[in-house]
Image (cartoon, rainbow, N blue to C red):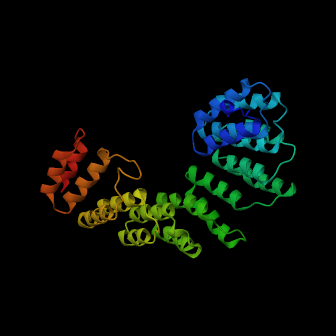
């Protein structure tokens, strides 16, 4: 901007920094923040600090987060709702629950998002016994739990391997006035896979169908994974076929399901359809085939009885062939 005679103000800097953060360019965002600190006449505001704290959270960098916290204290912004909430999230991500509680207590005007950040942090740090107390305090403060509150609590239970309790919370959520959203489905499906019970997967799948979430590529991919782990390739295929816009991730999930269950011919047929439809692994998604991709294809060919084709593929692999790949061939 300066080269064409326009001086950047803090709004311009904030737009650039938040843009970098939203696109996961975290180092670039932090470098821009350093420039802001050296710019004459430019003073970071709450939006600047909140955005940079989000970068620290995504990086799980406690050291950088503390540095930004210091900048907030110097400017008297640690009590700002946006900055305070970002501090709570950062400390919770770094498993510093005591520091998160202190940052929360310093916020002058808490909102639902601030409460959700702390409650989610308690769940993720496996401080489950403190959640009910926080929910009571939240209501006393004039705020009602919303879908994000539920999602944070359920996610914490899943991350701490409390899968039965996570499923119980999911059921309670459905019977309450709170409707699970697409993120709830994505959070709860791993709990189904850990317990490997198809009944639980079907329960979540039924809700996804009712809400139209099953057509989402990432929910569909997760359902394919879950059904395959539960031993039902038929249900995995049904979930795969419901995806409106399948991508490389969902294709790989279905191919892996076929390989795992020894249905090599079906896997090869699907792979050929994928190629025919134009989804080439090294084109749109810029993913180059790795040793795992080649091993998967050799496994599929071997299980389908096409040992000659599998051997020819091994000879054409442009990478160092390992024992796993040879084992896939011999297993056929």
Q: Looking at this rendering, what residue extends furthest in the left direction? A: 308
Instruction: Classify 59 as above or below 300.
Output: above
In percent of width and height, residue 257 lies at 35, 62
Q: Is residue 234 left or right of residue 86?
A: left
Q: How many numbered callouts?
A: 0
In percent of width and height, residue 132 lies at 75, 55
Asked whether residue 312 is in view, the answer is yes
Q: Residue at x 46, y 65 (%)?
A: 245
The image quadrant where one finds the C terminus is bottom left
Q: Residue at x 70, y 40 (%)?
A: 51
Q: Is residue 129 left or right of residue 214?
A: right
Instruction: Classify 329 as above or below 318.
Output: below
Is residue 262 or residue 251 the one in the foreground?
251
Asked whether residue 330 is in view, the answer is no
Q: Is residue 29 left or right of residue 204?
A: right
In percent of width and height, residue 53 lies at 69, 37
């Amino acid at each position: 901007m300066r080269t064409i005679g326009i001086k950047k103000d803090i709004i311009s800097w904030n737009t650039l920094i938040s843009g970098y953060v939203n696109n996961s360019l975290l180092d670039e965002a932090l470098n821009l923040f350093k420039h802001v600190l050296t710019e004459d006449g430019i003073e970071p505001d709450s939006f600047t600090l909140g955005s940079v704290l989000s970068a620290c959270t995504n990086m799980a960098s406690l050291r950088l987060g503390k540095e930004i916290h210091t900048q907030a204290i110097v400017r008297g912004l640690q009590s700002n709702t946006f900055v305070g909430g970002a501090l709570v999230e950062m400390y919770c991500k770094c498993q510093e629950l005591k520091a998160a509680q202190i940052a929360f207590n310093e916020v002058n005007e808490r909102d639902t998002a601030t409460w959700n950040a702390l409650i989610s942090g308690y769940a993720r740090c496996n401080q489950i016994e403190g959640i009910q107390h926080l929910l009571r305090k939240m209501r006393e403060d004039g705020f009602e739990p919303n879908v994000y509150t539920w999602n944070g609590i359920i996610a914490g239970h899943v991350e701490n391997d409390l899968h039965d309790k996570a499923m119980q919370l999911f059921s309670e959520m459905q019977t309450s006035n709170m409707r699970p959203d697409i993120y709830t489905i994505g959070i709860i499906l791993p709990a189904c896979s850990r317990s490997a019970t198809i009944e639980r997967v079907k329960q979540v799948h039924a809700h996804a169908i009712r809400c139209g979430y099953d057509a989402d590529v990432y929910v569909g991919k997760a359902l394919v994974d879950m059904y395959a782990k539960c031993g039902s390739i038929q249900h995995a295929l049904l979930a795969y076929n419901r995806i409106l816009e399948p991508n490389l991730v969902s294709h790989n999930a279905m191919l892996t399901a076929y390989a795992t269950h020894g249905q090599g011919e079906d896997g090869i047929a699907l792979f050929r359809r994928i190629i025919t439809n134009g989804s080439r692994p090294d084109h749109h998604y810029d993913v180059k085939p790795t040793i795992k991709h080649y091993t998967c294809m050799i496994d599929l060919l071997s299980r389908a009885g096409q040992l000659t084709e599998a051997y020819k593929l091994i000879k054409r692999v442009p990478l160092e062939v390992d024992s796993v790949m040879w084992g896939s061939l011999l297993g056929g």
